[in-house]
Amino acid sequence: MAAASQIWVHGELAPDGSLAKISTEVATLARTLGEASGADVVGVVIAADPTNAAEELARFVPKVLAVTEPATADHAAGTIVGQRLASIVEREKPGYLFAGAGPEGRDLAGVVSALAGWGVLVNAVGVTWDGGPVVTMSVFGGKLTTTSRLTTAHGIVTVRPNAIAAEPAAAAGTVEPTTVDGELSLPSVRVVDRVEAAGAAAPIEEARIIVAGGRGIGGPDGFKVVEELAAALGGAVGATRAAVDSGWIPYAQQIGQTGKIVKPALYLALGISGAIQHKVGMQTAGTIVAVNRDPDAPIAEFADVVVIGDLFEIAPALLAALRARAG
Ligand SMILES: Cc1cc2nc3c(=O)[nH]c(=O)nc-3n(C[C@H](O)[C@H](O)[C@H](O)COP(=O)(O)OP(=O)(O)OC[C@H]3O[C@@H](n4cnc5c(N)ncnc54)[C@H](O)[C@@H]3O)c2cc1C
């Protein structure tokens, strides 16, 4: 397989117009692969106002193309950005395109794949280089780990949030304003309103400490102690799908296969059994502490510390100790 001439990184915007955290992670990964392969690494930001995000992305990669695309101001970005990316990809012919495996990255990967005829490897948890990207993916809810590569010298890789630790480059790169012409021919979704999700005040994807509650919490009132512990530790509140499906806490807090993937330094699990679908969302936490009254709960197999007992005794005692220590 020929060496890639260029590895491109899609720079996604956060709601405030800054660069999304996932893009700092993907850019760090792409830079590492560029060093391993000798390929040039180029960022691409396509937005109504790409300036801030492009400058932030240039802290991670040597060169960033900034494309002004007014349509993203009031339309969902994925399809629009995907069409523009497909045009530049066909014009400039880079080797590979890397994007975050969030809603926007998934949308644009599909569009670029369909329009440019490129293959896609999705949900990478790690990528190495051997003549092209060698992509590790977690599939079937974490039951299997697969290693795949593309059969052509170009393609798209989407990378899971929190799989890579973001690190800026030693020197900042340059930003080049770039134009892409042509019709936007695919149907797109017009955004009529933006509403902050419940629970968005404490984004769990970025929290260093997460206190999570499961079915063992027993009901919405039980989450009070979870919230108090999270506040005392300066962390965020997480939950299992069982707790979310019961309506005890908003979906935004769900961790796992069909929720969010998190990587905090400390994960305190209260009344959580540790089902595989939950485990895949939190297994890379630095230290996992589980409180469970069942010593045979699956979480005991992968937690660093297991406290066997009733969470309604242990959690308030822990809270009291933390408050006493804080004075
Ligand atoms: C396709 C699919 C996708 C899924 N996606 C997700 C996902 O994204 N996230 C997710 O979390 N789940 C997901 N699930 C559900 C998952 O399989 C489990 O059902 C769920 O994680 C269980 O949640 P839980 O640990 O809160 O509940 P349970 O498995 O019921 O465990 C409750 C635990 O609390 C303990 N307990 C009870 N009372 C106390 C007490 N007083 N003190 C101490 N411990 C106590 C019990 O011993 C038990 O271990 C998915 C399932 C499917 C099929």
Image (cartoon, rainbow, N blue to C red):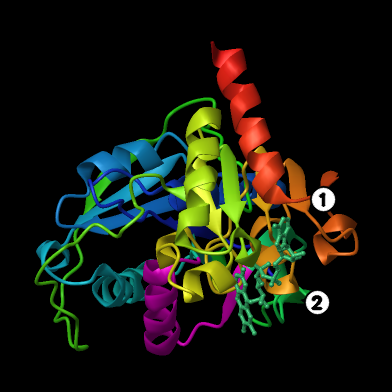
**Residue 297: quarter of image:** bottom right
Mark 1 touching mark 2, by CB under 8 A?
A: no
Q: Residue at image x 51%, y 64%? A: 219
Q: Is residue 162 left or right of residue 304?
A: left
Q: Residue at image x 54%, y 68%? A: 243
Which residue is at the far top? 327
Q: Nearer the viewer, residue 252 or 286?
A: 252
Q: Residue at image x 50%, y 48%? A: 237
Q: Nearer the viewer, residue 57 or 39?
A: 57
Q: Which mark is residue 144?
A: 2
Q: Quadrant of the N terminus?
A: bottom right
Q: Position of residue 181 (x, y in %)?
A: 16, 71
Quick one: SS at disc 1? loop
Amino acid under disc 1:
Ala
Q: Position of residue 80 (x, y in %)?
A: 24, 74
- Residue 153 magenta: no
- Residue 103 magenta: yes
Q: What's the magenta region?
A: 101-123
